[in-house]
Amino acid sequence: MKALHQTSFVESLMIQVRVVGALLMREIITRYGRNNIGFLWLFVEPLLLTLVIVLLWKFLRADRVSSLNIIAFVITGYPMAMMWRNVSNRAIGAIAANASLLYHRNVRVLDTIFARMLLEIAGATIAQIVILAVLIAIRWIDFPQDVFYMLLAWLLMAMFAVGLGLVICSIAFKFEAFGKIWGTLSFVMLPLSGAFFFVHTLPAQIHQYVLWIPMVHGTEMFRSGYFGSSVATYENPWYLLLCNLILLLLGLAMVSKFSKGVEPQ
């Protein structure tokens, strides 16, 4: 009996994987079009911001007082921040966009949310890899000091993005007004994510408060992997992992609760 139960679980899992895969393909076509021209924006946006900051850096002549590669600084912070912001924003509209599909027996609310979040994470990951590779190839930035540590940081932040997306989607479903203001709130939160500062450059008396913010640890980890010992960082991977697990469990519980009133019985 135990073996039969295990087989049934595996089969059910494979069905849901195929469902998420189908929803993912639908999201790709809907989001980027059949020609995937919209996909280019994933590369253009961080490059445009990098250009603006580099020009500002040169205009203020900050390069005379700091040897920091400002291009590397921006590109190791901003794309990661945009990943969790975009994932949470896109998760909000997942149910409304796929409401008609919920009448299919195997499609669940969680599947529609996961499909959207996976697309954002995959797009952000591809864009980050390509941009870093191109900038390294043209020698605008150096090769990272610890690629594995950067991958670990990115994985942890992707996990954070999923947990945050589930929580935000659940709150927005219950309070529609929240879904409309989250885009603004998440934008305001960007400066707090560590994307535009190193913790060690802040006054020592506020370090302990800044390090309560999970996103800061992910950014510090990613930059530690890139810059190595040339910069001081204050990350704690275990703290970030703990925050991720709490968000994931909370998010899954919240989605499970409101799904019962959404999925046709």
Image: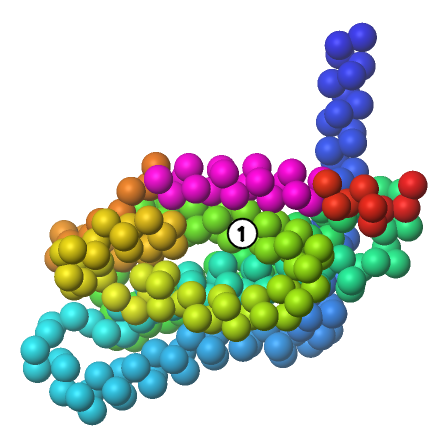
Is any atom of residue 98 visible in this view? yes
> In the rendered view, does 51 fall on the left or right side of 171?
left
Q: Residue furthest bottom?
A: 59
Q: Position of residue 97 (x, y in %)?
A: 78, 64
Query: Which residue is at 36% across, 52% downward?
Result: 213
Q: Amino acid at mark 1?
A: Leu
* Residue receiving disc 1: 164
Q: Which residues are magenta?
A: 239-256
- Please say if 92 is above or below 164: below
Q: Quadrant of the C terminus?
A: top right
Q: Residue furthest left?
A: 65
User: Residue 219, located in which quarter of the rendered image?
Assistant: bottom left
Q: Is residue 137 magenta?
A: no
Q: Position of residue 214 (x, y in %)?
A: 38, 50
- Please say if 38 is above or below 167: below
Callout 1 secondary element: helix
User: Residue 172, located in which quarter of the rendered image?
Assistant: bottom right
Query: Which residue is at 73% across, 33% downward?
Result: 13
Q: Quadrant of the N terminus?
A: top right
